[in-house]
Image (cartoon, rainbow, N blue to C red):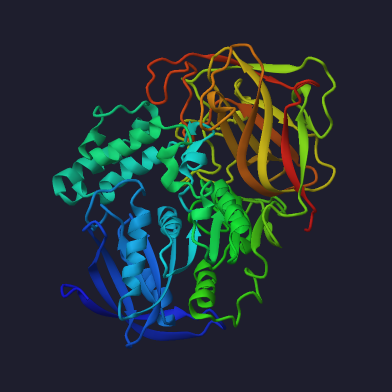
């Protein structure tokens, strides 16, 4: 072990997974241990070991956010694990130059195999962590290190070319925020005080970057850290699902993923909800090893009962640390004492279904949406039936097909006045099940007025439901549309409309998910094909997956528009290359809903259980 490592003894109290008993355990920490990579670069790690001598199963976390590992150590070391937390390449105190995950497969492999050779390791290694830290697990598994035994990726940032960054040809602007912010928080240049101060100052202008697209090489302060600027602009330019995104594509190359037990953890309101659930589906189909999934009503990396304007009830809170430890005990220690006998591992898929609450206002002012856990043999659940609800003339929505020969709705989409993002699958305090009204919490929609009032939002809504409707699974909108432009966007949003009540006199328009398609990518995510103005084309819009009971008396609503900012970049409607335009024009867009062009949303209807 590195002679320069500092050794400290910490006494911790940790709750046992069983009866709630407590015990005190010491552990030994060694900081900034250098782990050599195959190209000669050293990556640094903190290592936390039980005080007693021995060989232990190991929990590994590889992070770009600054290693510590104290929390992981307190959770696992008293239970007989070693814990290793490593700065990824070019971040924290690790050497080398950062690139967005492209070196993480080989770095993950080298780290796992180095750990396996240490005298305190028994050669059985599991990985854990959320977001980027979740992605490093899958990327290591793609390299197939022999001693990687199991992984628990939570909301992993993977599949960037097919939904996580590029979504239907549009660009998730969250990555702009991430790169501008994290250039100041962990880059090599940020280790120097004057550059750190300059980068910190720039990170305060993240909204300026969002509202002044495109980002051009060498013309913003991000040029101080050229590897960050280069990666951001390369991403903004690469809208096709091509070799540029190959490194993060787990779904299309799932055969390369190591066959090992995988426990996927995700949230219906996480920006990676589609990617997490779809990766589970791909692994489940391919793997001989167990693959499990939990999807809660949570935003990114937060397992809360309430967020945004909504409370999902006490059952939504889970002790994921205890659940994760049960998984590791099973696959790293062969401990089957409790595994599979109690939730969440009785069945492969554990899904939280929101919407069974009574809609009262809680003490902290939230709408009580409620919900319950549903254990299933798989996801999508086998007995869910995709059921079309058709967009009707006059703004209706129903399972009945439209019989009119000609029926359409036309609106203007001005890219200089995009529809603001309010909640949904984004990151930060504005993520989640927000009421679709503006207010002080929405920086680009501060008026306390509903989005449905906008002239560029076309609303289709059922009559009040006569019985509960339970929707669980992937959501798609099949749209027939035309435009005055050669390229434009179409967006769709699924909303649970609460009726007026004494607690919420104006009702409550609860978002369950949304999506977008850029017209030039309507036929393929690998090839552009522009429209002929005025010609009608079919579009398929993938929405975030939904798990919600639309209760009796509520309405199911679908909003169609052409922008959702800043969740997605705004289409200038000119057909110019991605990240290389200087003009914006207003597009006149038409949604067709007739017998010949039966635009509809496909809802996976599940048997109502509660």
Asked if one can make out residue 366 in the rendered structure from this viewpoint, the answer is no
Vertical position of residue 551 compared to residue 532: above or below: below
**Measuring 57% from the left and 63% from the top, which residue is drawn there?**
317
Q: Nearer the viewer, residue 286 or 14?
A: 286
Residue 302 in picture, x, y percent from top left: 50, 57
Residue 111 in percent (x, y) is at 33, 65
Q: Position of residue 283 (x, y in %)?
A: 57, 56
| Horizontal relation, residue 52 to residue 520: left or right | left
Q: Is residue 596 left or right of residue 260?
A: right
Across the whole image, how many numbered discs are drawn on residues?
0
Tell me if residue 169 comes above or below residue 120 in the rendering.
above
Q: Quadrant of residue 581?
A: top left
Looking at the image, can residue 191 be seen?
A: yes
Residue in the picture at 49% in, 31% down: 170
Q: Quadrant of the N terminus?
A: bottom left
* Viewer-side residue, 243 vs 545: 243
Does 368 sit above or below residue 446? below
Q: Residue drawn at (67%, 17%), measured in percent from left and top?
A: 536
Instruction: Kindly identify the residue that appears in the image at 38 percent across and 36 percent down.
Output: 235
557 vs 145, left or right, is right
Asked if 460 appears above or below 175 in the picture, the reply is above
Quarter the C terminus occupies: bottom right
């Amino acid at each position: 072990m590195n002679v320069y490592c500092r050794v400290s003894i910490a006494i911790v109290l940790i709750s046992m997974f069983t009866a709630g008993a407590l015990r005190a355990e010491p552990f030994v920490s060694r900081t900034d241990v250098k782990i050599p990579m195959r190209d000669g670069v050293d990556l640094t790690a903190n290592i936390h070991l039980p005080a007693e001598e021995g060989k232990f199963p190991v929990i590994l976390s590889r992070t770009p956010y600054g290693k510590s590992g104290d929390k992981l150590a307190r959770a696992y070391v008293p239970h007989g694990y070693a814990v290793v937390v490593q700065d990824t390449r070019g971040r924290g105190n690790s050497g080398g130059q950062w690139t967005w995950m492209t070196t993480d497969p080989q770095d993950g492999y080298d780290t796992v195999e180095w750990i396996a050779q240490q005298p305190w390791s028994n050669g059985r290694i599991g990985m854990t962590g959320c977001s980027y830290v979740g992605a490093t697990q899958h990327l290591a598994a793609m390299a197939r290190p022999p001693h990687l035994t199991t992984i628990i990726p939570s909301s992993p940032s993977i599949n960037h070319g097919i939904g996580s960054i590029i979504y239907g040809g549009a660009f998730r602007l969250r990555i702009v925020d991430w790169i501008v912010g994290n250039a100041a928080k962990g880059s090599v240049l940020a280790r120097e005080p004057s550059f750190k101060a300059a980068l910190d100052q720039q990170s305060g202008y993240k909204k300026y970057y969002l509202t002044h697209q495109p980002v051009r090489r060498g013309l913003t302060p991000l040029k101080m850290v050229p590897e960050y600027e280069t990666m951001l602009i390369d991403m903004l330019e690469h809208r096709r699902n091509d070799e540029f995104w190959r490194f993060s594509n787990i779904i299309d190359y799932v055969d390369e993923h190591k066959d090992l037990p995988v426990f996927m953890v995700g949230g219906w309101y996480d920006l990676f909800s589609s990617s997490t659930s779809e990766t589970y589906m791909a692994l489940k189909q391919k793997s001989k090893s167990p693959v499990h999934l939990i999807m809660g009503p949570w935003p990114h990396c937060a397992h809360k009962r309430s967020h945004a304007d909504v409370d999902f009830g006490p059952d939504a809170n889970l002790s994921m640390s205890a659940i994760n430890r049960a998984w590791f005990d099973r696959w790293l220690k062969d401990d089957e004492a409790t595994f599979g006998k109690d939730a969440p591992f009785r069945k492969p898929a554990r899904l939280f279904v929101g919407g069974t609450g009574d809609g009262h206002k809680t003490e902290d002012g939230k709408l009580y949406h409620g919900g319950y856990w549903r254990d299933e043999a798989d996801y999508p659940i086998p007995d869910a039936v995709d059921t079309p609800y058709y967009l009707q003339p006059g703004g209706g929505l129903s399972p009945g097909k439209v019989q009119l020969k000609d029926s359409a709705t036309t609106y203007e989409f001005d890219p200089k006045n995009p529809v603001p993002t309010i909640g949904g699958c984004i990151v930060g305090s504005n993520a989640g099940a927000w009421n679709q009204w503006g207010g002080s919490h929405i920086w680009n929609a501060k008026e306390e007025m509903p989005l449905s009032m906008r002239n560029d939002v076309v609303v289709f809504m059922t009559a009040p439901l006569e019985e509960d409707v339970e929707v669980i699974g992937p959501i798609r909108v099949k749209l027939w549309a035309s435009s005055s432009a050669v390229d434009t966007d179409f967006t769709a949003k699924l909303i649970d409309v609460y009726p007026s009540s004494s607690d919420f006199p104006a009702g409550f328009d609860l978002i369950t998910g949304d999506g977008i398609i850029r017209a030039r990518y309507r036929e393929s995510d690998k090839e552009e094909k522009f429209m002929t103005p005025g010609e009608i084309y079919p579009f398929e819009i993938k929405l975030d997956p939904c798990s919600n009971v639309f209760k009796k008396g509520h309405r199911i609503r679908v909003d169609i528009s052409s922008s959702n900012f800043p969740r997605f970049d705004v289409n200038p409607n000119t057909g110019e290359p991605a990240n290389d335009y200087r003009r914006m024009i207003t597009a006149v867009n038409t949604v067709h809903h007739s017998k010949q062009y039966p635009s509809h949303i496909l809802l996976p209807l599940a048997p109502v259980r509660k």
